[in-house]
Amino acid sequence: MTIDELWETILGSAPADWVHHELVPNPAQHTSFAAFRPDIGVGLQWGATCVAKFEESWVARFPDRSAYSVWVDSLFQGHMVDRTALVIVDGGRCYLPLPQGMDRTSVIERDYRLARLIQGIVHRNQSLVDSYLETAGVQRPG
């Protein structure tokens, strides 16, 4: 399997395709793991803190201004093959992709789809990502 095939598999999946486990909380380590039901060689783990106190102007638009970023690792047969940062905003209510560019007003497709997937696995509400991006003034892809 190539990295592109791994991403195609992950991003083409739905939250129901994953078995999710919470791990022992530790900011330096991942706190969640999910195995892909159709192919247990594919996995995701996330929760290790990237930036403990994430401060950008778009984060201040949410009722709870606390935010932090975490790493999401894509796994194949137990090996990390890629890493992406997501921002957890509004006191932990929503996972968002990190806005890109100088103006921080857009996100890339892969990060957007990954944020929706993780949001769906954890909170069972993928569409919340769209409303939070709109509140933040960040354009989603397409």
Image (spheres, grey):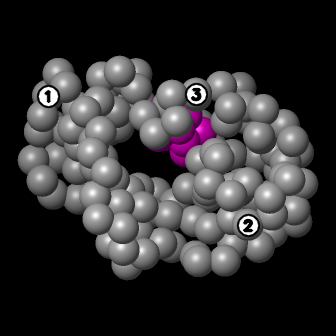
Write the residue at 31% across / 51% down.
Answer: 22
For the residue pair 111 and 95, the one nearer the viewer reads as 95
Q: Which residue occupies the extreme front position in the image? A: 24
Q: Determine whether label 1 and label 2 are within 8 Å by CB.
A: no
For the residue pair 53 and 105, the one nearer the viewer reads as 53
Write the residue at 23% across / 59% down.
Answer: 80
Q: Quadrant of residue 41?
A: top left
Q: Earlier in the sequence, mark 3 or mark 1?
A: 1
Could you tell me how far apart the alpha carbons at marks 1 and 2 are, in whole angstroms?
36 Å
| Range of magenta residues | 111-119
Residue 6, horizontal then vertical, whole percent: 27, 37
* Residue at the disc numbered 1: 39
Residue 120, horizontal then vertical, whole percent: 49, 31
Residue 49, horizontal then vertical, whole percent: 48, 72
Q: Determine whether label 2 and label 3 are within 8 Å by CB.
A: no
| Position of 125 relative to 135 (above/below) | above
Label ID, residue 66: 2
| Position of 99 relative to 55 (above/below) | above
Write the residue at 28% across / 58% down.
Answer: 23
- Crowd tier of the residue under label 1, counting other residues whose Cα lies within 10 Å: few below 14, some 14–19, many 20 or above: few
